């Protein structure tokens, strides 16, 4: 069973990871294979609260990245690892294939270029197909030609992130939430990381702070990186919208653009996601939705899939990508940066890890472990447990299994979320997670409460009641931590 370690315990860690997104948690899990004392510090009230929660959840094959780049190398290596890793951790995923569709004959040459890049990157089985094959592979899609990638897939990015951390926790790693690094000092051969929960000493640090990785690096006196936030907005349909999409459908990607164009992606539960847009913003936390972007999403998606023009949407959301822009603007969007600082030996920076960072995360983790192993003896743990404790999903059970659960525990018979069929027992288990995450969004990411058609209209008051039953005062209940309180006082009738 996982345990939450005493926050006040003073000790020296072999490695401290800063940032609880997919890449940081993959690094933590990979390092937990070895006899190391590990710590992960996350600034938010839960894991996957940054880049990792606001994306399409696509496992990329590796043909939309420049040949020879670190993005391409880690994408290809990560693709070879992520399906097996997701299965090992019990994370929902599916290999679906993918179509990159050309709406005009003139765009076929661009598909040939993408295929050539994919071939150079070692992507297997890419094929350019005609209109008849497009309709056979995905009846909802339209186009003259398409690049078909059979090894692309979809995954739940936040569940993947949480599972990586839980596995690392089972193997002795410590995770602290709401612990932003506010200052860094180097003395006595150790990095001293100051947070609101105390100061922690570590022999090595992996800076995987995502959008804030440049700012965290500057705390350590490393001033050579700049991260530029690009917002991508999305729309999502009801899973009972009347359409069933089998695989992601992308347009031919525009040249010299920060994104891959507005594409259409199925979720594992049957929803359809439109997006993302791509625009620079000033604020790294600006995940607002805009009327202009919503209109563009609908219009461009309808070109690839006309049936979407009659579908209603249940939610919009946005994510932020960390783009790298150098001073000369020669490399406008930049490659991944995975490097140890020459100025601060022992400090490893992971900067500009955007798409395909989710797919590349396991490979980046192995790369980081190799960098650490080059300077210290990494002794494998014979007792390393590669799997994690699995959760029971009421919605996925048969009637007989449900009857048995309810007979043993009445909490399995109380539906908290009608849209997603989530039982009270699942919410209680989510709130008793090993990292102390007790926000409404933490429950959502672990159970799917609030992700259905009513968007929390039915389940929110019930989750609030359960939070209070679990000892949370009503005035401390938040959506995602910080100042996102749900209640600000009492009214008397």
Image (tube, helix red, strand yellow):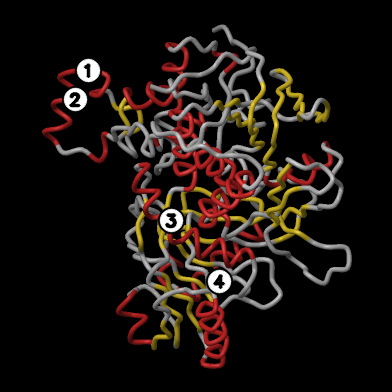
Q: Residue at x 44, y 12 (%)?
A: 470
Neighbor class of circle 2 (other Cα within 10 Å; few <14, some 14-19, many 20+) is some
In the rendered image, residue 230, in percent from the top left (x then y), is placed at 71, 56
Residue placed under numbered mark 2 in the picture: 405
In the rendered image, residue 144, in percent from the top left (x then y), is placed at 44, 88
Q: Looking at the rendering, in which quadrant would you find the C terminus?
A: top right
Q: Secondary structure at mark 4?
A: helix
Horizontal side of 396 relative to 303 (left or right) equals left
Q: Secondary structure at mark 1?
A: loop
Q: Nearer the viewer, mark 4 or mark 1?
A: 1
Q: Is residue 307 above or below residue 342?
A: below
What numbered label is drawn on residue 409? Answer: 1
- Going from N to C along the chain, the mark reached first, 1 or 3, is 3
Spatial separation of the CA atoms under disc 2 and disc 3: 34 Å
The quarter of the picture where residue 332 lies is bottom right
Q: Secondary structure at mark 2?
A: helix
Q: Residue at x 64, y 33 (%)?
A: 15
Q: Nearer the viewer, mark 3 or mark 4?
A: 3
Q: Farthest residue in the front direction? A: 377
Spatial separation of the CA atoms under disc 1 and disc 2: 6 Å
Neighbor class of circle 3 (other Cα within 10 Å; few <14, some 14-19, many 20+) is some
Horizontal side of 489 relative to 422 (left or right) equals right
Residue placed under numbered mark 4 in the picture: 300
Spatial separation of the CA atoms under disc 4 and disc 1: 49 Å
Viewer can see residue 388: yes
- Going from N to C along the chain, the mark reached first, 4 or 2, is 4
Q: Are marks 1 and 2 in contact (CB under 8 Å)?
A: yes
Residue placed under numbered mark 3 in the picture: 81
């Amino acid at each position: 069973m996982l345990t939450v370690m005493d926050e006040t315990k003073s000790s020296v860690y072999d490695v401290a990871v800063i940032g609880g997104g997919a890449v940081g948690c993959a690094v933590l899990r990979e390092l937990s294979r070895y006899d190391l004392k590990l710590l992960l510090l996350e600034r938010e009230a839960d894991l996957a609260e940054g880049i990792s929660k606001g994306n399409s959840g696509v496992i990329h094959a590796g043909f939309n990245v420049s040949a020879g780049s670190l993005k391409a190398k880690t994408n290809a290596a990560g693709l070879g690892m992520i399906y097996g890793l997701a299965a090992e951790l019990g994370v929902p995923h599916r290999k679906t294939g993918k179509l990159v569709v050309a709406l005009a004959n003139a765009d076929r040459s661009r598909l040939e270029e993408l295929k050539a890049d994919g071939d150079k990157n070692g992507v297997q089985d890419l094929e350019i197909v005609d209109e008849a094959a497009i309709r056979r592979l995905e009846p909802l899609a339209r186009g003259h030609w398409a690049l078909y990638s059979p090894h692309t897939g979809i995954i739940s990015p936040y569940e993947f992130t949480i599972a990586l951390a839980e596995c690392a926790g089972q193997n002795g790693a410590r995770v602290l939430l709401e612990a932003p690094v506010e200052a860094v000092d180097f003395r006595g051969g150790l990095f001293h990381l100051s947070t609101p929960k105390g100061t922690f000493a570590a022999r090595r640090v992996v800076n995987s702070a995502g959008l804030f990785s440049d700012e965290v690096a500057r705390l350590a006196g490393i001033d050579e990186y700049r991260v530029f936030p690009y917002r991508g907005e999305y729309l999502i349909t009801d899973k009972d919208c009347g359409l069933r999409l089998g695989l992601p459908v992308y347009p031919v990607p525009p040249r010299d653009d920060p994104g891959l164009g507005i594409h259409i992606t199925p979720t594992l539960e049957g929803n359809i996601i439109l997006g993302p847009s791509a625009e620079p913003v000033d604020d790294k936390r600006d995940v607002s939705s805009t009327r202009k972007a919503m209109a563009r999403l609908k219009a461009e998606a309808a070109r690839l899939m006309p049936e979407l023009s009659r579908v209603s949407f249940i939610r919009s959301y946005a994510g932020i990508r960390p783009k790298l822009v150098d001073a000369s603007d020669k490399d406008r969007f930049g490659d991944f940066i995975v490097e140890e600082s020459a100025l601060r030996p022992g400090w490893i920076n992971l900067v500009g890890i955007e798409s395909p960072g989710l797919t590349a995360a396991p490979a980046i983790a192995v790369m980081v472990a190799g960098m650490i192993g080059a300077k210290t003896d990494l002794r494998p743990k014979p007792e390393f447990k590669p799997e994690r404790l699995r959760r029971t999903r009421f919605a996925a059970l048969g009637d007989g299994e449900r009857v048995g659960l309810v007979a043993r525990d009445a909490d399995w018979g109380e539906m908290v979320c009608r849209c997603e069929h989530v039982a009270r027992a699942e919410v209680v288990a989510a709130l008793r997670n090993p990292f102390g995450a007790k926000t409404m969004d933490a429950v959502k990411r672990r159970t799917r409460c609030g992700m259905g058609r009513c968007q929390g209209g039915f389940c929110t008051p019930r989750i609030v009641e359960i939070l209070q039953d679990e000892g949370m005062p009503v005035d401390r209940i938040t959506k995602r931590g910080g100042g996102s309180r749900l209640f600000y006082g009492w009214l008397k009738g």
